[in-house]
Image (spheres, coloured by chain):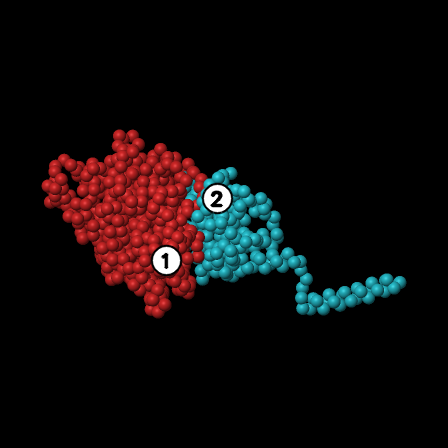
Amino acid sequence: MPDAQNNAQNNALDQSADELARSFAFTTKLDAIAAWGQRNALWPLPYGTACCGIELMSVMGPKYDLARFGAEVVRFSPRQADLLLVAGTITEKMAPILVRIYQQMLEPKFVISMGACASSGGFYRAYHVLQGCDKVIPVDVYVPGCPPTPEAVLDGVMSLQKMIKDRTPRPWKDQWQSPFEINGQTVPSSLTSSNTFAKGVRP
Amino acid sequence: MSQLEILKSDLTTKFGADVFKFSTTAAGDHVVEAAKENIPALLKYLKEYAGFNFLMDVCGVDYPTRAKRFDVVYHLFSSADSRRLRVKTQVAEGESVQTATTIWKGADWFEREAYDMFGIVFQGHANLRKILTHHQFVGHPLRKDYEADKQQHCNSVIPIHFNNTPEKAGDVLDPKFVPINIGPSHPAMHGTLRVMAELDGETIVRANCEIGYLHRCFEKMAETHPYNQVIPYTDRLNYCSAPMNNVGYCKTVERLMGIEIPARAQAMRVILCELSRVIDHIIAVGTGGVDLGALTAFFHLFTYREKVYNLFEKLCGARLTVSMTRVGGMAYDAPEGWFNDVLRFCDEMSDGIEEISKLMIGNKIFIQRTKDVCPVSAQNAIEWGYTGPLLRASGVNLDLRRADPYYGYDKLDFDVPVGTNGDIYDRYLVRIEEMRQSIRIIRQVCKNVPSGDYTVRDKGIVLPEKKDVYGNIEGLMNHFMLVIKGLRPPVGEIYDATEAANGELGFYLVSDGSANPYRLKVRPPCFAIYQSFPEVVKGSMLADAIATVASMNVIAGELDR
C-alpha cells in the first residue's frame, strides 16, 4: 500500500513539475537541439571559382539574401566555416587545393556543389577540367543549372537544412578518404610541401 | 597608295625584295609573312618606324600535315591611326623562334601560352615555362593530335616560385625575406588567382602570379563544336559581362562570312553591350571596395545589378549567361515594352551612379588607399598591352568604339574619359565615368530603335523560325540541312576586336571551311594587364598589391579561358 501511495504522490509531483516546466520551457533531445542550431546557423565558405561565383554574390546580395535562412556569416577562412559552397568549375590544377580547403574545415561540415561544372564538369568535357568536384570531396547537395538561379541555390541550402534536421545518414561523407592522402597524414605541414603528395594516387 | 602598299615599299627598301610575302584577306586584314629568322628585325622595325605601338596578341596555330608544322601569329595595332597588321611565320617542331619580349614586354605571357599549348619554343625568353596547364601535365593540348577530353590528373600544389621553375637554380628563397602565398581561395584574393610575394617587412621585394586555376580549355572546346554552339562557351569567358563576349565572337564570324546584320540587331547589341559594361564596372568597383573594406557599396551596387538581370531575364530568360546573339543577328526580338524598361532603368541607374560616386570616390579612406598607389605610366601601359579603362586611366585616349567604330558607335554622342596618373584612383574614376557614358549611349539608342528584322534571313546561316519548321516543308528542310551540314564560313582567317568592359577583346578565327572553327584564339584584355602585376607592385606595400589586383578587374574566366 505505501508503495502505491508513494507512486500516486510521485505521479502528482511529476505532473505538477511537468506543468511547471511547460509553462516556461520545453523538452527536447540534445542532438535535436544541436541540429536546430546547426541548420539555422550555417557559416558558408564561398569557394567561387567561376561564373557561379558571380551568381552566388546575387544569392548573398540584397534581393535574395541568404541571411534569411541563417547562412549569413560568409567566412573566407575554412577554419571558421562549416558549409563549403563549391561555386564554379574545378580544374585539375585546382583539385588538390579544394581537397586541402575541405580538410582544413572543422567538423561538422557540409558541401553544396553549385552548378553543372562543379557537379559534373558541365559542358566542359575537356582535358583540364575535373568532371565533378565529388571526384575529390564528398558532396551533400547538388544544385543544377548553368549557373543555377539564386532561387535554386536557396532551395539547395534548404534541402541541406532538412538533411541536418532529419539527421540523414551520409555514407559518402563517412567513407570519404582524401584522394591525395598517404600515411594517414591529413593536412600537410606547409604550403611548400608538394613532395608530401607526390606519391599519392587518385583512385 | 593603300596602307599596305606604303608599308610594302618601306619594307622592301629596308630589307630587300622578296623577303616578305604581303597579302590582304577577303575581309580586309593585312598580313605579312616572313621567315622566322627575319621576325625580330621585322617586329622591331614595325614598332619603331611603322607606328605599330601595340602588340595585341601572339599565338600559335597547328597544321600537322605541313612540313613546318606551326604558325606563330603576331597581331599588331597602331593606336595613332587604328591600323592592324598580322605577322605570320612558320616554325617546324623542335625549331625555335626569337622571342618578342625584348621588343614588347607584353609578349611575355602570350609566348608562354603558345609554348604551353603548342610547344613552340621562343628563344631568349627569360621565363619560358607552363602557364595555364598544371605542372604535372604532359604534352601540348592545343595540338591537333591531342584529344580534347584526355584528362591528366594533378595531385599536388606547385610550391612558391618566382622567376624560374622550382627545380632551376636562381629561385632560391632569400632567408632575409618572408615568402607569402595568397590564394587561390584566400580571404584577400579573388577566386582562383594566386599571388606569391617575398616580403621585407611589409614591402614587396618580388612578386609572381600563378594562373591557370580556371583553365577550362575554351579554345579546344571551340574547335570541337559547331560555330553557333561556341556561343554559350563565349558567355563564360568574362562572365561579369557575358553578352559582350557573344557580340565579339559573332561579329568576328559575321565579318569572316561577309554578313552585314540588320540595324535593329545592331541596336540591340549596342544596348546589351552597354548594359554589360555597366554591370561589369559595378562588379569591378564593388569588389574593389570590398577589398579595401567597404562592404556597403558592394551591396548597394548589387541592387542595380539585379535590375539589369531582370532586364536580361525579360529579354531571353537567362540572368547571367544570356547567349542572346546568333551568327547573323539576335536569337529573338525584344519583347514588347523592353526598350521602355531599359530607359526606366537608366533613370534609376543615373541616380545610383551619383550615390556610389559620393560614397566611394569622395571617401577619405578610399582616396588614401588608392591615390598615387602603384601608378602605371602611359609608356609602360602600351608596352604591356594594356587596353580599356586601365589604359585610359594611364592617359592614353584609345577606345575602339571611337578608334574603329562598329554598330553605329560613330553616330552616337558619348565621351571617352581619360585619367592622368594611371594610379588605382584614376582607374575607378574612369570606370565610374564610363558607367555614366554607357547610360548616355543606351538612352540614345533606346529612343531610336530601328524597326525591321532582328536577324538576317539567309537559309545557310540562320535557322528558320519554329512556326516555319513545323508549318511547312520548306522550313523543315532548311532547318534539317542547316543542322546537319552546319554553318560553314569560307576558308580564311580573321582577327576582329571589340571594346569590352576590360579592354580589347579580340578573336582570331581560322576557318578551314568545315562546320567547326579550325582555330579560335581569344585575346583577353586582362591577360595582358595581369602579366604586368609583378612589376607594378614591386616595392610597394602588400596591402597595395591587394588593391591593385582589385583595380585590374582580373576575371579568371577570360584570363585562363
Subunit ID for the residue under disc 1: B
Image coordinates of residue B184 in percent, x first then y, are 42, 51
Please, what is the three-letter code of the amino acid marked with disc 1?
A: Asp
- Secondary structure at badge 2 equals helix
- Residue A96 appears anywhere in the view: yes
Q: Is residue A125 above or below residue B235?
A: above
Q: Is residue B497 above or below residue B303?
A: above
**Which of A178/B329 is in front?**
A178
Residue on which disc 1 sits: B200
Please, what is the three-letter code of the amino acid marked with disc 2?
A: Thr
Q: Please give left or right for residue B43 compared with residue A139 in the image.
A: left
Q: Please give left or right for residue A34 compared with residue B359 in the image.
A: right
Q: Residue furthest right?
A: A1
Image coordinates of residue A162 in percent, x first then y, are 58, 54
Image coordinates of residue B152 in percent, x first then y, are 43, 38
x 41%, y 51%: residue: B192
Q: Which mark, residue A196? A: 2
Front: mark 2 or 1? 1
Q: Residue furthest front?
A: B176
Image coordinates of residue B320 in percent, x first then y, are 40, 52
- Visual hue assigned to chain A: cyan
Give the letter of the red chain.
Answer: B
Neighbours of disc 2 within 10 Å: few (<14), some (14-19), many (20+): some
x 89%, y 63%: residue: A1
Q: Are marks 2 and 1 on the same chain?
A: no
